[in-house]
Image (spheres, rainbow, N blue to C red):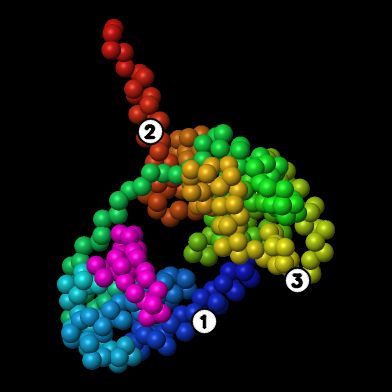
Amino acid sequence: MAIGYYIDRNKKNLRKLNDLLMELPDICSVYFIGISNDTTPLTRVNYARDLKIFFNYLIEFEKPFMKFKIKDISVQDLDKIDSMMIERFLNYTSYYDKVTGQVRTNTELGKSRKLSAVRSFLKFFFDKNLILSNVATKVKTPKIHSKAIIRLEDDEMTDIIDRTESLQGFSLHQQKYNDKLSLRDTAIVTLFLGTGIRVSECVGLNVEDINFSNHSFKVIRKGGNESILYFNEEVEEALKNYLILRESYKLPDSEHALFVSIQKKRMGVRAMEKLITKYARISTPLKRISPHKLRSTFGTNLYRSTNDIYVVAEVLGHKDVNTTKKHYADISEDIKKKASTSINLRK
């Protein structure tokens, strides 16, 4: 199993968290220990980053904290925070300068995530009866405007797979470079479209996780749970073709990663994202396609074939069926089109 990959990833995130704690109030250590049993290391790292921005804002712009250093902020000082400070903080994150001089912006989604971090932090100390109130609950969550679902149509799915195999549309120089990777890349694209796997799950796959006898493979899902997913004959063929190539790499016995880079080591998430973008630019230049968009494509197609949202949720690994809805939200467009042709104006 690829559990080793996830253990290593968690260790890296825990080291990042420890580094961030050196720049946060000492009370944050108590908070992060308190939420460690029901959050992942990555979630805690993201919370720590958002809290760092929040505390930097307080000591720079809010009078009760202007004479403070971040490390000096105590539990008692948290009662000086009011809801209007948090609202001003969210407004500040629309466009702000980091200490490094870099400019950062946040959409409603980014602001919502920062508000969640502040809410969780204050709620922890409020539940422990260490502060008088959790004023963050008085702050409205930014309204997140829905966006059009971006996914591949059937002909576009065919095209991106064909171009990944043939390298049609690339320059001769690009073809020469990508020719060594075509079988690997085809297997990755096909796996995304054929199973709806997450990019982190794909990166974490080991060779021994694949079971061709029953067309299945093991993944560690979001949250650390193990699950079995299944694939069709197209995915099987692409994987088998790639595995023949992989054998020629003469990798060390210690390297179990299914998908490896030209440096002969496990591919990373960023590398896999860039891979998908590279082929999508040729096949669907007007759409910004990522691994997650391929996952959405699979989710929509699965819903269309089953008409069962709970099946889709189970396969995609969603705990909340509402999360699944965004993967097939454009089904409503099919219903609208059907409705427009089903009504006869002259009877």
Q: Secondary structure at mark 1?
A: helix
Q: Give amino acid for label 2.
A: Glu
Q: Residue at x 37, y 35 (%)?
A: 332
Q: Position of residue 127 (x, y in %)?
A: 26, 77
Helix, strand, or loop for circle 3? loop
Q: Is residue 132 left or right of residue 223?
A: left
What residue does disc 1 label?
Answer: 15
Q: Cα distance, mark 1 to mark 2?
A: 46 Å
The residue wearing badge 3 is: 254
The x and y percentages for residue 151 are: 48, 43
Q: Residues within 10 Å of mark 2 (few under 14, many from 20)?
A: few
Pointer 1 and pointer 2: residues touching (CB < 8 Å)? no
Q: Is residue 51 above or below residue 304?
A: below
x, y percent for residue 263: 72, 67
- First in residue order: circle 1 vs circle 3: 1
Residue tagged 2:
333
Q: Quick check: 155 above or below 320? A: above
Marks 2, 3: nearer the viewer: 2
